[in-house]
Amino acid sequence: MLSKKVILLGKYGVGKTSLIRQYVYQKFSEQYLTTIGVKIDKKEVQVQEKSVNLLIWDIAGEDSQTKVPPTYKLGAHAVVYVFDLTRPATYESITKELKQISLELPAIPVWLVGNKSDLLRNNEIDEIIAKVSTKVHFTTSAKTADQVEDLFFKVAKHFV
Amino acid sequence: MLNDVKANFLKASAHFIVFDQDGHCLESEGQLISPNLLKGNLFENFSFLESNRELLSLMMLHDSYSFPCMNVQLEQSKEAYCDFTLQKVLWQRQEANLWMVHDQTEMYLRIMQLQQDRNEKAISGEFFEMKQRALNAERDLLKFKNEELKRQQEFKTQFYARLSHELRTPLHSISGLSTLLSEKQKAHQQAKYLNALQATSRHLLSIVNNVIDFSRIETGKMTWQAEPTALKDLIEEVIASFRYKAEEKRIEIKVTYAEDFPLTAQLDATKLKQILFNLIGNAVKFTDRGYVLLEAALTDKDQEFIELTVIDTGPGIAKEKEQDLFKPYVQLSNNGHVGSGLGLSIVKQLCDLSGGNITYIRPESGSGVTFRVTLPYLLPEKQIDKPSEELPLESHIQKMLIADDDEINCQVLVTYCKKYNIEAEAVSTGKQAIEKLMSNSYDLLILDYYMPNMDGLETLKALKKKELHQKKPVFMLTGSMSPTIKEEVLSAGVKKVIVKPIQPDALIELIRFDVPTDQSGINLDYLYKISDGNALLIKELIKKFLDTVPSDFAKIKQHQDGKDPFALQKMLHKSKINMKYVGMQGAFEKMEKLEETLSSGNVPVNLKLQISDLEKQVNAAVIKLKAEFKSL
């Protein structure tokens, strides 16, 4: 079975832990609990009759990617960069953040995800996506589970 | 002893595991990780190690990596925060992996608490800042709106002051000229006053129209409606209307056309006229010496737009006023010339409405004004044949009835129609109109919307109810430009809504373009079909119609008093088949119905009217068929 290390990055409070909790345990809590360090979760995904073991690293959100210990990113096979659709501060410097990631992890696929879509109307989401200088791959809601499964399936499918 | 203390202390908070490349535990020292978990494959038991399997295979001897603050469950349901270190070591002379686990839960929980507070505060701060930004933006917007309102209010106040002056001036002239005309004057003097009166009235009307147009544009009730338009004729017409004024000012007014400029095109003729009237009107008004030139061309690139450039040699526009050129209520008063301040703003909005634009081109010499308008157009599917003088109006409009309580308006229209050999009758109420239609046939009805007792719409409804409508075109006169009224009137079956005061010339134009010229109901397709395209046969059938039908109708008319219904029935029966040949299905059906009524010995009350109506159709058909006969 394939085992792939997927790391979730992004600023604090964007919902990285909630996305993983929803995806792995189908649970959601409104309460904000900050993550420190790293927590690793595991989920097996079936893609075209093949099993992929996703080892999902929930890395504590920081102001900047430079503050994340480099060893957390070592050997990563994919990056999911999450931002909060309702907080401009989480996507205003996204180009810089992604550039930093590509320097540390060259040739590693990065999925850009706007979370908390349940808090906005479709037209508002479209406006925000238009503001983000890079292509947003998914707009998810950890609360309603919208697009969460799709996101990780897409990541797993990449390895098959 | 101290070594023992140290060992015991480390045993409680640290664990050291040596394992091989396949994940089998070789040695373990510590109590943090349950011995059960150390049995079997460590890569399968610990996600951390599984994640780093590739990394471990690439590490060289003595390489070491630290992973601080790893959130793990060392024992069941006991969450811990540990610092991990992975190191490549020599174990019994073999390369092996060392995993050092240092439990720092207490410290990290304290850090987590601090981090939680810090993040919550930072997130609150972000939202506060966003709220502040939104409030600032809202405040700026309100400030801007307030300033804009103030500016508009100021302009409106000035505008109304100027507008009342603008309205009063021509009204005074009209009043004065009317007084002069009421006095005994020599004929040439009267003509001069009359001309001045007409010009002043037109000026007054244009000011009022501008104000109304502007309000319609502002409320978004105006749309661009493309229709087949005789483009060059329209331009010439506009130019012609300014020729007198230009001659009076001794300035030249000219127009040039690019070779590929289309004769006809699909665009909104009324609005194009408005645009040109405003631009050329301004140019003539402000130019006291030199010329006004209109250049008509197509845009260079794709030729999808017509390009109309109006150039004058007037005093030009002050630089500081250029930015306000197209703003409403802005006056570009030069040399004492004052307008409503809406003209250019209307032109701009009409251009925008069409999908085109208007630009101001600053003159190189410093004087004069150049405006360039581009408007989208489509070539019409068919060229428009403007009715020429050779096609007299009386061929389709011979008689019309006007119902309007404004006697002067009626008098003006009746007199004017006479010039074009149209017999026009006027009545002042809806009731009188109904009475007239009971005994007369008209080709066109003009009803006033507001009439005492019975208004235009009520009159029309009554006519339809009494079957006196005669399916003839109806124009409705109204003093209001309200789209609601227009919609109501058009949906009642009115052909055209005319806004008062109507210029007689404009009425004649409307009759030319809006009343179907062919009232005969001929369908030559039918003729061609039944003759299988045989020209000789077609000619023969047309000849038969021309030879027999007019004389038949002369005889039919002799029986229109209804005294001998059976003789009339026979005549109708004999003649009606000719109608069928030339596709006059309507006339055929009418004759058949009349024949049926007469065969039962009944005479319809409006027999004379029905025959007169049929005769008109026949006369129109004769004209058309003669032309067709010649062409064959």
Image: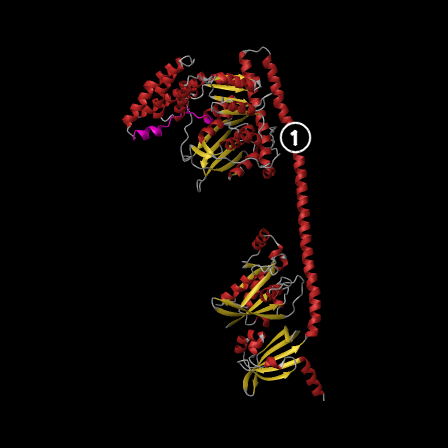
Quadrant position of the N terminus of chain B in the picture: bottom right
The chain to which mark 1 is attached is: B
- Judge whether A131 appears above or below B455 on screen: below
Residue B528 forms part of the magenta stretch: yes
- The residue under the point 65% across, 37% down is B152
As helix, strand or loop, the secondary structure at mark 1 comes to helix
Residue B455: name its quadrant.
top right
- Residue B42: percent from the left, percent from the top? 57, 79
On whether residue B608 falls in the magenta region, the answer is: no
Q: Nearer the viewer, residue B270 or B566?
A: B566
Q: Is residue B596 left or right of residue B73?
A: left
Q: Nearer the viewer, residue A47 or B560?
A: B560
Report whether residue B319 is seen.
Answer: yes
B375 horizontally vs B30: left or right: left
Which residue, as the protein is rendered here, is positioned at the far bottom?
B1
> Which range of residues does the magenta coloring cover?
B513-532
- Point out the residue furthest to the front here: B600
Residue denoted by label 1? B160
